[in-house]
Amino acid sequence: MQKVLITGGLGFIGSHVTQACIEKGLSVRIVDNLSAQIHGAVPRLNHAFLQDPQVEVVRGDIAVACDWEPWIEGVDCVVHLAAETGTAQSMYEISRYTNVNLVGTAGLLNHLANKPHKVARIILGSSRSIYGEGQYLCHGCGVVYPRARSEEDMRLGRWEPPCPKCGGAIKPMATQEDAKAAPASIYAATKLGQEDLIRIAGDALGIATVIFRFQNVYGEGQSLKNPYTGILSIFSNQLRQGGCVNIYEDGRESRDFVHVSDVARAILLAMTSTRADGLTLNIGSGVATSVAEVVPLLAKGLSVEAKSTVSGQYRVGDIRHCFADTRAIRDALEFVPEVRLEQGLERLLRWVRTQAVEADKLDAANRELLSRGIMGGAGNAAKTASCK
């Protein structure tokens, strides 16, 4: 393989994949729209790889591109990462998320179906959000897949999803790739749609495909400007300001945090071998960590007071728990995550301390969600607004 096209290559994950490709001796073409939500109104790009003669950068928007031909020319592999990614925002920016994530992907595949090219492999960055709540274990019913939590349940503080069969208590378990898909947000639905488009078109066109379902990716370089994604970056920015971190629900909701360097390493493995061709694979740590747990870890790393409040607020479309079963990616690519959360946070915070403190846009984003009825629990938040 000689040349790689990375859509969204100036974004958080894309920039790490680009660097990994360069270190492997690969030539890279980047297509990125430099979204103001991620990069700011005036993008400040300081990636060292921008000076590398092996890297070509094109500013372009996959959602409005009428011709992929100059982007695809000479490319052997496409790493498709460009996407709108905010779960909550997707619930009211429905056209934009559908346009970028689905129409943009369709544009790529339409070109490959109708124009000469040399693309032999497509790697898609998908999301664990397609599982919804994922797999749980019920003592009486066995493995179950709970429905998305209702607004009424969350308003009443019934945070844990019940067994969909008997209504009893259930326990989250590692979610396998063959688990039932149950998207709970527009974002998740578009990611599942992307998967189907890539898989079906790849099979029809004779192009190898690899689909990676990312868990909660974090690490150095993650946008400190975007209030909709990257809770570790959002929290660290708030703590540096001396502000109070608003922890939604009861703080016991959990996520599977995986460092971006591990994600980039997995993608590179799939680019340079055939062992994952045709597979859909989780990329995660396989460990569930509660949201409330990470605030003191971040505060300690920043040497600041861990001020937070468990507000009882909630967002429609958020899941309660989900962590990855990572056996399939280990078997296919001999991939095991190398960066433990404590190490990854240290690397993240070392980078955060070199960055300017950004204006906290989370309150404004939450007001937008509240005004649209996508966020609730404002009454509880008012009662528990004291920071500790």
Image (spheres, rainbow, N blue to C red):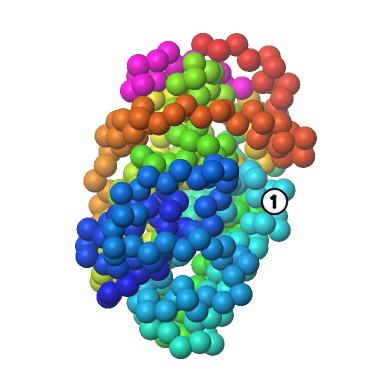
Write down the region rendered in magenta.
Answer: 299-311
Instruction: Pinpoint residue 38: horizontal percent, then vertical percent.
Output: 53, 45
Find out whether residue 307 is within the magenta segment.
yes
* Rendered residue at 67%/41% (across/down): 316
The residue that appears at 37% across and 79% down in the rendered structure is: 74
Residue 9 vs 358, above or below: the answer is below
Which quadrant holds residue 95? bottom right
Q: Residue at x 53, y 22 (%)?
A: 245
Q: Residues within 10 Å of mark 1 (few under 14, many from 20)?
A: some
Residue 238, x across and y down, in percent: 50, 24
* Residue 239 visible in the snapshot: yes
Q: Nearer the viewer, residue 162 or 101?
A: 101
**Is residue 5 a member of the stretch shown in magenta?**
no
Looking at the image, residue 183 lies above or below residue 371: below
What x and y, as percent, mark residue 15? 37, 52
Q: Is residue 158 above or below residue 9?
A: above
* Of 317 and 241, the residue lying toward us: 241
Q: Is residue 341 visible?
A: no
Please state, as top left, top right, bottom left or bottom right, where the N terminus lies in the image: bottom left
Location of mark 1 (residue): 93
Q: On the picture, is 353 further left or further right than 238?
A: left
Secondary structure beneath disc 1?
Answer: loop
**Quarter of the rendering containing residue 27:** bottom left
Q: Position of residue 223 (x, y in %)?
A: 47, 40
